């Protein structure tokens, strides 16, 4: 990492248009940062202060893990596709994700990145030149939806559209779908976890079309609400989705779905949860009116989440291919963490919706908390499906009833 002083040319926009009109020069202290195989220029927060640097250009070092995961995904998808691919990143900020796609995935033919912030665009263009990627990366100054809509025509659509906003991705999903090729992939990040995890369920309903619920498995509900949003928006164009993989890490959830013209493998429905005994039940959307709101296990009142995606959230075969790809990516700084995450995802890929956490079971039933792996082994020995989950290191997926699980915990 180094630092330098430079002058940034900031381009202003005409109101309501993206025509460059006036120019002004702003002196910004710069630093050089290495991430993966690329070098990027960023504001120097040691000189400006962290808050001032963020106002100039946002870069989050903690999401380097997400970018490493995305690179592994893109390499896997491109390899299985067997031809050069085009990628769009409409909310690029520093440009580091798009630059890494172009530099580190040989099968990528072109990356088009854009941002509405003219300072971000100038930084991205300098970083493109710094890495010698002018023939592979195009940088545009544009609103994300306008950029994607402009490419939502025959001959302009992308193989992969990566939507990674600050907050909810809901405003961008429709245009992302329209700018993605059939058979292509939409990668979407959501960082608005309080609404998605049940703190503000009415906000989740407004943004994603389904109620959230504050349960021990709320991060999986967040993923399923995000998938439901993608499913619903794709359905407007007689399209469907196939989730390939997803993960919940730190302050965000991220999903990768393939856009299809055939019927979705999976469905939508509601999730009923009993806070008294922790029984939960997935109900198809067509059967929701037939389901009693009382828990069949203890008779307590059940709370509802959804509508949400009730099908598989992982494609096991694709996730196994991700593991194979990762084994060849020795340069990734987060390789060991990615390997652990992907092994957990593969292990839980065939599991039922939702998971139990031993801490919640122990609290509700006032029993001693067992070791997760030992309990899983005992359940498997009796013929049940049981697996760990990447969502919670004290969580497990289990295909039996809560009463059957309690027999093991109390024996």
Image (cartoon, helix red, strand yellow):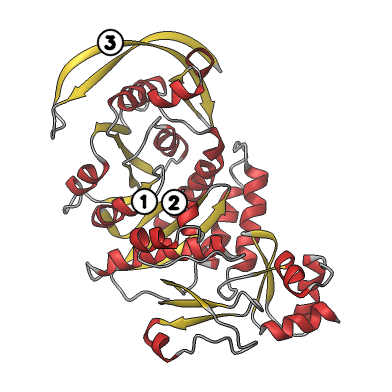
How far is disc 2 from disc 3 in space, using C-alphas?
35 Å
- Read off the residue under disc 3: 25
Q: Position of residue 53 (x, y in %)?
A: 45, 22
Query: Residue 385's x, y, as percent?
Result: 68, 79
For image coordinates 82% across by 72% down, the residue present is 367
Residue on which the image places disc 2:
190
Tell me whether circle 2 and circle 1 mark residues in contact (CB < 8 Å).
yes
Dot placed on the residue nearer the N-terminal end, 3 or 1: 3
The image quadrant where one finds the C terminus is bottom right
Q: Which residue is mark 1?
A: 169
Give yes or no for contact between labels 2 and 3 (Cβ–Cβ under 8 Å): no
Q: CA distance from mark 2 to mark 1?
A: 6 Å
Up-down relation of residue 45 to residue 194 (above or below): above
Location of residue 316 (image quadrant): bottom right
301 left or right of 57? right
For the residue labelled by badge 1, is the local secondary structure a helix, a strand or a loop?
loop
Q: CA distance from mark 3 to mark 1?
A: 33 Å
Q: Position of residue 197 (x, y in %)?
A: 51, 59
For numbered disc 3, what is the local secondary structure?
strand
Judge by depth and name the residue closer to the eye, 399 or 409. Answer: 409
Q: Earlier in the sequence, mark 2 or mark 1?
A: 1
- The residue at 81%/67% (across/down) is 369
Pick the front one: 94 or 406: 406
Vertical placement of 54 versus 326: above or below? above
Tell me if I can see residue 40 in this picture.
no
Label 2: element kind: strand
Q: Residue 297, relative to residue 376: is it above or below?
A: below
Please state, as top left, top right, bottom left or bottom right, where the N terminus lies in the image: top right
Residue 19 picture location, percent across and down: 13, 28
Query: In this orientation, does residue 297 appear?
Result: yes
């Amino acid at each position: 990492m180094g630092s330098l002083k430079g002058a940034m040319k900031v381009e202003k926009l005409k109101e309501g248009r993206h025509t460059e009109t006036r120019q002004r020069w702003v002196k910004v202290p710069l630093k050089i940062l290495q991430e993966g195989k690329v070098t990027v220029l960023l504001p120097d927060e040691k000189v400006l202060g962290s808050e001032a640097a963020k106002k100039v250009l946002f870069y989050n070092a903690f999401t380097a893990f997400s970018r490493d995961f995305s690179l592994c995904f893109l390499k896997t998808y491109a390899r299985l596709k067997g031809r050069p691919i085009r990628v769009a990143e409409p909310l690029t900020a520093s440009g580091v994700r798009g630059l890494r796609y172009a530099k580190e995935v040989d099968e990528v033919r072109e990356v088009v990145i854009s941002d509405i912030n003219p300072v971000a665009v100038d930084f991205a263009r300098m970083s493109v030149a710094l890495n010698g990627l002018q023939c592979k990366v195009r940088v545009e100054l544009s609103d994300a939806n306008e950029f994607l809509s402009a490419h939502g025509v025959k001959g302009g659509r992308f193989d992969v559209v990566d939507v990674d906003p600050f907050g909810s991705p809901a405003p961008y999903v429709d245009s992302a779908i329209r700018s993605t090729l059939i058979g292509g992939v939409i990668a979407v990040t959501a960082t608005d976890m309080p609404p998605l995890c049940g703190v503000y369920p009415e906000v989740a309903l407004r943004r994603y079309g389904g109620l959230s619920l504050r349960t021990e498995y709320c991060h999986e509900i967040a993923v399923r609400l995000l998938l439901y949003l993608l499913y619903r928006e794709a359905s407007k164009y007689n399209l469907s989705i196939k989730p390939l993989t997803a993960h919940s890490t730190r302050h965000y959830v991220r999903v990768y779905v393939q856009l299809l013209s055939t019927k979705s493998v999976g469905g939508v429905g509601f999730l009923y949860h009993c806070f008294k005994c922790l029984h939960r039940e997935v109900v198809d959307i067509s059967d929701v009116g037939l389901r009693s709101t009382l828990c069949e296990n203890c008779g307590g009142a059940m709370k509802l989440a959804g509508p949400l995606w009730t099908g598989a959230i992982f494609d096991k075969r694709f996730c196994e291919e991700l593991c194979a790809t990762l084994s060849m990516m020795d340069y990734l700084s987060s390789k060991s963490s990615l390997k652990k995450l992907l092994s957990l995802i593969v292990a839980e890929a065939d599991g039922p919706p939702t998971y139990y956490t031993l801490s919640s079971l122990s609290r509700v039933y006032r029993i001693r908390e067992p070791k997760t792996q030992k309990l899983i082994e005992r359940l498997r020995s009796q013929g049940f499906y049981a697996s760990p989950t990447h969502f919670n290191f004290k969580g497990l997926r289990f295909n039996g009833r809560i009463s059957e699980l309690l027999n093991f915990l109390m024996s």
